[in-house]
Amino acid sequence: MLLDFNRLRKEHNVDIKGVIHVGGHIGDELEDYRGIDNLIIFEPQKHCFDQLVAKAERVGMRPTLVNKALGNFVGEAEIISDPTGLTGSLLEPGLVVDYPDIVFSEKFMVDVSTLDEEINHPHPYNFLNMDVQGYELEVLKGGSQTLKTIDYVYTEVNRAEVYKKCAMIEDLTAYLQNFGFIKVAEAWHGDWGDAFYIKE
């Protein structure tokens, strides 16, 4: 996270009842979520998912863990990944190929679902965190019902095609405005960054 999670909570009086984390990788944010009772994490890459499961056990947490990608349809799709799982996307790499530590050498099929399919209603979650390598808008499109009861969205954003045809920050901001969200913070690392939205 480029934006400090605990600082955001204090500065914006964030009252988290439960977290949906899409793109959990190997559980880097688990410690940030300690003390939050309702936590569900989605991670489609099996080698990352296995490490996520192991880390949750190691730190004594019991989140709901789901080995799926999320998007705007239910089915299967090809993911393009580097061997470490540091990054993997349902979109083709764009400018990200210029990053020296990332080599896209693996392609495999993953299960894809939607937020609305996976999250039962009513649900205990009000915070959505997305780190899905350019696929954020597709996740949101698959969660129109779920978004109605989400109060906070933390998401990776782009201002160039880090992944081909990825949504730009303006696209995400405009889409989230339809559900009453405003952007209150952002931070950048070159062409990609993180942004935080709160429902008015």
Image (cartoon, rainbow, N blue to C red):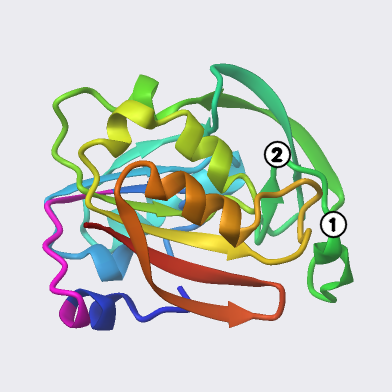
Compared with 146, 6 (above or below) is below
Query: Which image quarter is the C terminus in?
Result: bottom left
Total labels drawn: 2
Q: Where is residue 152 in the image (x, y as percent from the top left)?
A: 27, 56
Instruction: Tell us which disc is closer to us: 2 or 1.
Output: 1
In the picture, residue 72 is in which quadrant? top right
Residue placed farthest to the top in the image?
Answer: 75
Residue 132 is covered by the magenta coloring: no
How many residues crowd around disc 1 within 10 Å: few (fewer than 14), some, or many (20 or more)? some
Mark number for residue 94? 1
Compared with 168, 180 (above or below) is above
Q: Which amino acid does label 2 sit on?
A: Leu
Q: Position of residue 140 (x, y in %)?
A: 46, 38
- Residue range in magenta is 10-19
Mark number for residue 141? none
Residue 103 in sight in this render: no
Tell me which residue sits at (36%, 24%) in the image. Answer: 116
Tell me which residue sits at (77%, 46%) in the image. Answer: 165
* Viewer-side residue, 10 vs 179: 179
Q: In this view, does 153 lie to the left or right of 43?
A: left
Q: Which amino acid does label 1 sit on?
A: Gly
Tell me which residue sits at (47%, 76%) in the image. Answer: 186
Residue 16 is covered by the magenta coloring: yes
Q: Is mark 2 on a helix, strand or loop?
A: loop
Mark number for residue 90? 2
Q: Position of residue 59 (x, y in %)?
A: 27, 64
Q: What element carries label 1?
A: loop
Tell me which residue sits at (31%, 27%) in the image. Answer: 145
In the picture, residue 150 is in which quadrant? top left
Query: Which image quarter is the N terminus in?
Result: bottom left
How far is the residue under mark 2 from the one under mark 1?
12 Å
